[in-house]
Amino acid sequence: MSGVATEHKANDAKDNAGEKGVAMVRMVIEHKVKDVALVEKFIDVIRQVRNEAMKQKGFITGETLVNVDDPTNVLVLSTWESVDDWNGWDTADIRLKLKPKINELLSEPYTVRKFHYYLVQQKRVRTIF
């Protein structure tokens, strides 16, 4: 099946992507688990966290990636309607309650990077059919 790329205007919420806190964002959270033997336990904790995140305003999707060459290196990708929605989740009571469960399994503090979807910022969305 061949794909055809098209561009069209994003919906109204995304049309204001240049405004602070409005553009869809992808959070890239990198974790270094203490030991390979703890990775499954860590993934279980991430599932708990994601189950709670799914209930929050603005949550779109989440993924967990385990490095093929180093299974203790785990990325969590989390997509939100806006930075403000992410910030609301990041400071929510339930997230703060779950953070110690994550931290106890890590050899170093996790890092968080925020990325805007470029095409949404440009008031275009690319889809492949």
Image (cartoon, rainbow, N blue to C red):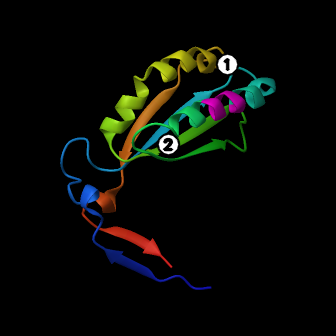
| Residue tagged 2 | 78
Would you identify the image quadrant in which residue 31 lies?
top right
Residue found at x 67% / y 25%: 33
Q: Nearer the viewer, mark 2 or mark 1?
A: 2
As for residue 126 lying within the magenta part, the answer is no
**Residue 7 image position (x, y, % from top left):** 34, 76
Q: Label for residue 105? A: 1
Residue found at x 58% / y 36%: 50
Q: Main secondary structure of the magenta part?
A: helix
For the residues marked 2 and 1, what is the alpha-carbon distance in whole angstroms?
Answer: 20 Å
Q: Label for residue 85? A: none
Q: Name the residue nearer the viewer: 34 or 94.
A: 94
Q: Amino acid at mark 2?
A: Ser
Q: Amino acid at mark 1?
A: Leu
Label 1 packing within 10 angstroms: few (<14), some (14-19), many (20+): some
| In this view, 53 is above or below 92 | below
Q: Name the residue nearer the viewer: 32 or 4.
A: 4
- Side of 55 where 69 appears, left or right: right
| In this view, 122 is above or below 105 | below
Residue interval drawn in magenta: 43-48
Q: Name the residue nearer the viewer: 115 or 22.
A: 22
Element type where label 1 sits in the image? loop
- Side of 45 where 86 appears, left or right: left
Going from N to C along the chain, the mark reached first, 2 or 1, is: 2
**Residue 69 image position (x, y, % from top left):** 72, 41
Q: Outermost residue toward the right?
A: 37
Element type where label 2 sits in the image? strand
**Residue 101 image position (x, y, % from top left):** 63, 17
**Residue 79 image position (x, y, % from top left):** 45, 46
Quadrant of the image containing the N terminus: bottom right
Residue found at x 40% / y 22%: 91
Would you identify the image quadrant in which residue 71 lies?
top right
